Image: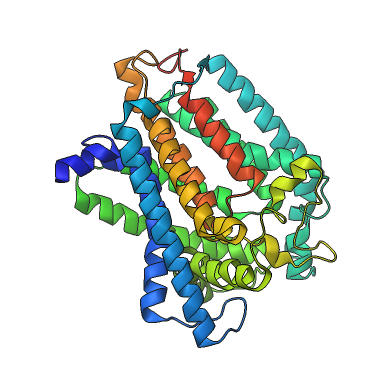
Amino acid sequence: MENGFINLLGSNNFYRRPVFLFLFVYMGVLFFPAIYLNITGYSEAMYFETSLTDRSNYYGQNLIANCLFLFGLLCSIFIVKTSPSVKINFPQFFITGKKMRALGYFSAAVCTIYFLLYGSQKLSNLGTELSPKEFRALGFDDVPVFWALALEVTRKVFFPILIAYFFVTKHKIYFWAAIFFFLLGALSTLDRFPFLMVLVFSFYCSYQSTTTLSALVLKLFIMVVLLGLAASVLTYVQYNRLDVDLGTILSSASDFLLHRVLLVPSFAATEIGFRYADIHGFFNLQYSRLGFLFGVERIGFNTDGHDPYFVAPVGVTADVFRNFGYLGVVLVSVFFGWFLVQFARVRSDNIDPGSRGKLLFIKGFLIINLSTYLVFGNFFTMGVFAVLASCYLIKNCKFEELSSD
């Protein structure tokens, strides 16, 4: 039975595989917290005050949705892995070191221009009398849509690929340059995510070389502590609050880990996702930011005449539910099961045996990047679909020069 389960996930080193990495992030941040809230009835209100009866009902809906998602995901993984008839080989294309460097130059140029035009102004106001809300808005509300979109694509799609690629190909100069410009783009808006992803990447590199469970648990604990401390410091900087002491930072770090990482995704799902679907009915993509591609008004937190909570991040299961209900949750989970198995496969004619591990390393990090957006954001967004597209481009590429170029 154990060998069969390991085989289902991909190999004897199943914990390094994209399928396991996705399950690890999803279950840790969405599935298990949904069980915890449903059993304990934890009643802290993060967004809205609701009755205990309503809260219990939304907790139950959240748990049902996550159970359906996990069930559909595992069934889809099993069927795709055991049924040759559902294997699909899409056309391949070549990615070479030359093309990756060109992508790096473009991404570096975007981050540099953005920093010079908007980021430097934001940093110059750090520590001034600007209110936290006014300071946080700098680099966002005053930026044209084109530049905001360009920065998001480079940070969410291009740089994760570049960082992992240059690391495994041992191009140290390009690797550290990618890290530098990735963080330069982060300085322009003072977002926490890019800084934290650098820590996650460091842990991921260590995780890939871990051979014992005890060492893995120890490294995971260290990473969680460092993430909490880093997120705490960055949160105060984000809101122009520099007059804090070490005790405040440590307290905020523990609060960040408990709420922002473990419970807030579930609180957002229940109080915004399931509650709003109950009050307003299913959205049917009416408020999805994907509509921006088809000329529909893009709704943000400051859009006049619209409730900003219609587009608030609630996690993949709640976002799918508030748009299409339980049926949508099942269909999306089946899609992800198919996607993960297809993404994890390496065609025998695609890469030499010595480079197979390097390709899996890149794929694993891209799955962590995708998983983070899914559990802390929404599914029906341009960012997630761009990351999905980038993952599948990597899956179907032929790394002609992966080992050396």
Query: For residue 359, what is the image quadrant?
Result: top left
In the image, 202: left or right of 92? left
Is residue 151 placed above or below 313 in the rendered structure? above
Horizontal and vertical percent for residue 249? Answer: 52, 71
Name the quadrant of the N terminus. Answer: top left
* Residue 172 visible in this rendered orientation of the protein: no
Q: At 56% from the left edge and 55% from the top edge, which residue is drawn?
A: 320
Is residue 206 placed above or below 378 in the rendered structure? above
Q: At 80% from the left edge and 68% from the top edge, which residue is drawn?
A: 130
Q: At 28% from the left edge and 40% from the top edge, which residue is drawn?
A: 9
Horizontal and vertical percent for residue 239? Answer: 68, 66
* Residue 318 visible in this rendered orientation of the protein: yes
Structure colour scheme: rainbow
Q: Nearer the viewer, residue 61 or 145?
A: 61
Horizontal and vertical percent for residue 228? Answer: 46, 63
Q: Nearer the viewer, residue 124 or 155?
A: 155
Q: At 83% from the left edge and 45% from the top edge, which residue is drawn?
A: 144
In the image, 350: left or right of 50? left
